[in-house]
Image (spheres, grey):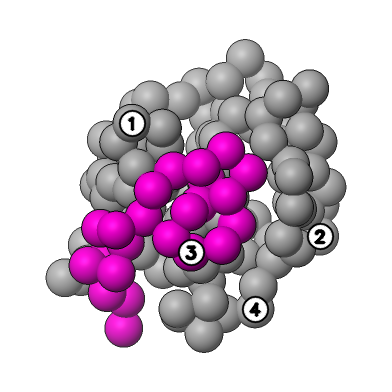
Amino acid sequence: MFDPDKYRSVIWLKGGRAYPELDCFGIVNEIRRDLGLTLWPEFAGVTKDENGLDREARGLMSELERCAPAAGAGIACYSAGMVTHVAIVVDIGGVFYAAECNPKSNVTFTILSRFERRFVKVEYYQ
């Protein structure tokens, strides 16, 4: 069962992959670990700089299956035709939320319909 309280102490860190210092991709794998799911590649050092996130996300997505929103599904978020952010679906009280990590706000949980409105396109993968 997913425990959102664990993530209240997370601090956003660019390129962060070790709890409690995580970035948007770091939180995806940390939550996958907590849910008992197979971890995705760590992509150490990959950030949005020089389109690194877009390049690595697209490579990973080619190996995964697109799906409907479900607990543990990764979320690829597009702006201007590029993957500029990633998040993960979590189930809190029977409702699906996007768990994400950003500068200033650190970890937030946003109902999927509201989360999706922030991006040109979102896709879900498992």
Q: Residue 71 in the image: state x and y as whole percent.
A: 41, 68
Q: Which residue is mark 4?
A: 38
Q: Nearer the viewer, mark 2 or mark 4?
A: 4
Residue 29 belongs to the span the image colors magenta: no
Tell me which label, 4 or 1, sits earlier in the chain.
4
Q: Which residue is mark 2?
A: 63
* Quadrant of the rendering where the C terminus is positioned: bottom right
Q: Which residue is mark 3?
A: 19
Task: Identify which amino acid the numbered label 1 is placed on.
Answer: Lys
Q: Which residue is mark 1?
A: 104
* Residues at marks 3 and 4, CA–CA distance in whole angstroms: 17 Å
In this rendering, is residue 22 above or below 123?
Answer: below
- 22 to the left or right of 102: right
Q: Nearer the viewer, mark 1 or mark 2?
A: 1
* Quadrant of the rendering where the N terminus is positioned: bottom left
- 7 to the left or right of 51: left
Q: Nearer the viewer, mark 4 or mark 1?
A: 1
Task: Identify which amino acid the numbered label 3 is placed on.
Answer: Tyr
